[in-house]
Image: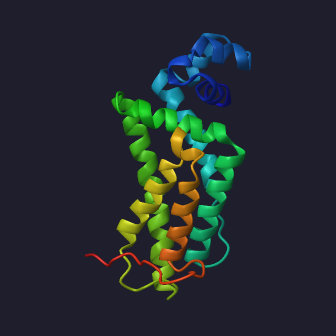
Amino acid sequence: MSAAFNQIAERGFEGLRTREVAAEVGVNIATLHYYFPTKEALIRGVVRHAMDRFRSTLSSRGSGPIELRDHLRAVRKLLREEPQLGAVMGELALRSARDESIAAILNETYAAWHKTMRGLLRRGVKEGRLRPDLDSEGVAALVVATLTAMTLPTMAISPQTDLALRQLERWLGLTPSPGPAIRPQATD
């Protein structure tokens, strides 16, 4: 998975060559196909590898809102320190518009991430640290969309991503606000 991940990071999806992946890890192509019978299976492994890096930014310390704040900050730091992670996820996101199998893999991945974010938000409401009328479903979608946008090439280096994350933190009351905070509207 690492070899395939690195090829996508360096050359994009179209530059992924299974023979080169096999050669890089020192196996023949038949062995690679035994473990990854299709290119889709290899991509699923690459996405799992990437998402393991994102999951590593989640901690089980503190309240739901503190975990969420720390996750937002750690993801931003991770993408700065490992730009190839954003490059791979951004490349696959762009490719998913033309490839149903990659779209399905990413949709599953985003659904799991959304569920985790929603859980942190609900826990924050239950703990009394977030507004009781917070729409955890909608806010989780906003968090995932913001973090996902950070993997797109032009957004990865944009100062607007830092602004978006800081605003999310203020919006949710995760950091002190320099002025009146804009809070998410409650919805049913």
Residue at image position (50%, 68%) is 168
Quadrant of the rendering where the C terminus is positioned: bottom left
Compared with residue 142, is residue 99 higher up or lower down, i.e. above or below?
A: above
Coordinates of residue 72 in the picture (x, y in percent): 59, 62
Compared with residue 4, is residue 26 higher up or lower down, i.e. above or below?
A: above
User: In which image quadrant can residue 96 be found?
Assistant: top left
Residue at image position (62%, 16%) is 31
Can see residue 52?
yes
Compared with residue 106, is residue 38 higher up or lower down, i.e. above or below?
A: above
Residue at image position (53%, 56%) is 160
Q: Nearer the viewer, residue 12 or 40?
A: 12
Quadrant of the rendering where the N terminus is positioned: top right
Considering every residue shown, the one lying at the far left of the view is 188
Q: Nearer the viewer, residue 165 or 38?
A: 165
- In the picture provided, is 158 more to the left or to the right than 188? right
Coordinates of residue 152 in the picture (x, y in percent): 50, 41
User: In which image quadrant can residue 76 be found?
Assistant: bottom right
Coordinates of residue 39 in the picture (x, y in percent): 49, 22
Coordinates of residue 15 in the picture (x, y in percent): 56, 18
Can see residue 56?
no
Residue at image position (58%, 59%) is 162
Considering every residue shown, the one lying at the far bottom of the view is 128
